[in-house]
Each structure stands twice: as C-alpha cells, then as structure tokens.
Image (cartoon, rainbow, N blue to C red):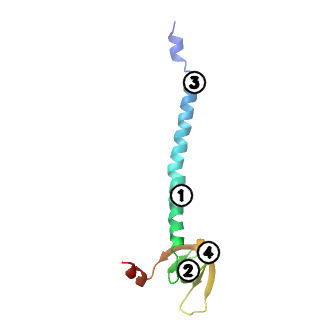
Amino acid sequence: MQIGLLTQPSGALNLATLVMWIVFMVGIFYFMAIRPQKKQQKKMDAMMSTLENGDSVVTTGGFYGVIIDVMEDVVIVEFGNNKNCRIPMKKSAIVEVEKPQSAIASKE
C-alpha cells in the first residue's frame, strides 16, 4: 500500500518551507525597518551638508536659533534677540533647517 507514503511529509520539503519562511521574514524586516531608516539617514545627511550661516534651525531640545558659524562637525548657534547667547553644538543636534527668504529668492 502506498497510501502511507502520501500522508507522511518529506523532511526535505519541511526544511525548504522553513528556509523560505525565514527568507520571507528577513525580507519583511528589511522593508519595514532597515530601508526606511536608511532613507531618513540620507535625508538628514543632505540637510547637514547644506547648513550655511544665517539659516534658522530648530535643535533637538526645541530651541530656535540662527547659525552664525559652520565648522566640520560643530555649528555655533545664536539664540534670542540679544547677541550674547551663542552656543556651539554638534550638527546632529539640529532637527530642522529653514533657509532665509533672501537665499531662496536668489536661487530662483
């Protein structure tokens, strides 16, 4: 009787199915977690490379300021209307940049 052979699953078939599910889960993880994070990192790198003097910025602490000097990894940001509050900070502490209107108009 060959009915017994048809009802028992093959070991190689189970292994192939398991490997296929693992590859599928890794693919889902890549598209749900890793790929969006890389896109966000590229966007942040592009923003950091365009920092210039006079740009209005928002820091991770929620402070608004104006960049007065840009160095390699550090920027000096001026906070408030009095010109005495100048703080050096890492570029990575900046979360948002707004270009001055004169710079935008001159590029167009």
- Between marks 4 and 2 in the image, the one whose residue lies nearer the viewer: 4
Residue 90: x %, y % from top left: 62, 75
For the C terminus, the quadrant is: bottom left
Identify residue for label 1. 38
Question: Gap between marks 4 and 3, in whole Å?
Answer: 57 Å
Question: Gap between marks 4 and 2, in whole Å?
Answer: 22 Å
Identify residue for label 2. 63
> Which structural element holds mark 1?
helix
Lateral position of residue 15 relative to residue 99, left or right: right
Query: Which badge, 4 or 2, is on the more N-terminal residue?
Result: 2
- Between marks 1 and 4 in the image, the one whose residue lies nearer the viewer: 4
Residue 82: x %, y % from top left: 56, 93
Crowding near the residue tagged with mark 3, few <14, some 14–19, many ≥20 C-alpha atoms within 10 Å: few
Question: Gap between marks 1 and 4, in whole Å?
Answer: 22 Å
Query: Which badge, 2 or 1, is on the more N-terminal residue?
Result: 1
Question: Gap between marks 2 and 1, in whole Å?
Answer: 26 Å
Crowding near the residue tagged with mark 4, few <14, some 14–19, many ≥20 C-alpha atoms within 10 Å: few
Identify residue for label 3. 12
Image quadrant where residue 101 sits: bottom left
Judge whether 59 appears above or below 85 on screen.
above
| Kind of residue at disc 3 | Ala
Crowding near the residue tagged with mark 1, few <14, some 14–19, many ≥20 C-alpha atoms within 10 Å: few
Rendered residue at 45%/79% (across/down): 99
